[in-house]
Amino acid sequence: MQSIMRVPDGIRCLLIIPCYNEEGSITRLLNEIHELDAGFDTLVVDDASTDQTYHQAVAYSPVVRHLSNLGIGGAVQTGIKFAYRNGYDYCAQMDGDGQHPPSEYLKLITVAINEHPDIIIGSRYAGLTSFKSTLMRRLGSSLISKALSIVHNKVRVTDPTSGMRLINRRAMAFFSCHYPADYPEPISLAWAFKIDMKVAEIPAYMRHRTTGVSSLKGVRKSFNYMLRVIGYLLISIFQKNNFSLPNSNN
């Protein structure tokens, strides 16, 4: 399968960029997207930043500004709702800290167009060795991956906490109504598996954060994150399934 070099004419894809205090990286990231000139639209969701994120971003992109901090789940869902209501064919999550190179999203949309999964994940661990995370994060991701596979009896996802992902309109319709506020990346996958969404994963190159502060910095935070996510996954076994997957692309 040959990777596309640009979003094909007639297909609309929105890059959703949730941000909280990313003044050190957002201008550079938006410039990189514009210089790539691959046909992506952008929407920055400023989750009530206390720095200059909004003022820097609005010069380069449409921006939705939350009046109060909703967290990553709320910020991403705002972008998904925007994409769905404005008729986008696909939307993708991109971290505002610059870790996700815009060119990698051409790989995701290539898979979306050719294979038609509902969700495509860019994985740091699926065959690439360029990204080196901490031992605790690798361990946590591995354990969450195994728990997700056991709980939902699905093919294992190597990077369930990856924020590099692209979804189609069926997934947009679902996540516009149902999206986890806490630990959204792995929990949204659990919900997707629960209603038999098709999930694909491809190797993706990611960079290390050079500005700002990660919300999972430190061994204790990473360990607590892992335990809480696995707990949520176990609880989901006994949750009543009130979800439904839309059948229409409208």
Image (cartoon, rainbow, N blue to C red):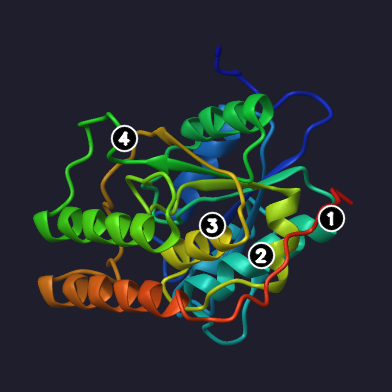
Mark closer to the chain start, 2 or 4: 4
Residue behind mark 1: 86
Which quadrant holds residue 220?
bottom left
Residue 13 lies, in percent from the top left, at 70, 41
The answer for how far apart the CA atoms under marks 1 and 4 are is 33 Å
Look at the image and tell me whether residue 229 can be seen: yes
Rendered view: 46 above or below 170: below
Relative depth, front residue between 243 and 29: 243
Residue 189 position within the rendered picture, expressed as x and y whole percent measured from the top left = 49, 59
Residue beneath disc 2:
175
Q: Which residue is mark 3?
A: 193
**How far separated are the C-alphas under marks 2 and 4?**
25 Å
The residue at which mark 4 appears reads as 126
Specify the amino acid type for callout 2: Phe
Separation of residues labelled 2 and 3 (CA atoms): 13 Å
Amino acid type assigned to the residue bearing label 3 in the image: Phe
Q: In the rendered structure, which disc, 3 or 4, sits on the residue that comes first in sequence?
A: 4
Image marks 1 and 4: residues in contact by CB distance under 8 Å:
no
Q: CA distance from mark 3 to mark 4?
A: 20 Å
Q: Nearer the viewer, mark 3 or mark 1?
A: 3
Q: Is residue 93 left or right of residue 225?
A: right
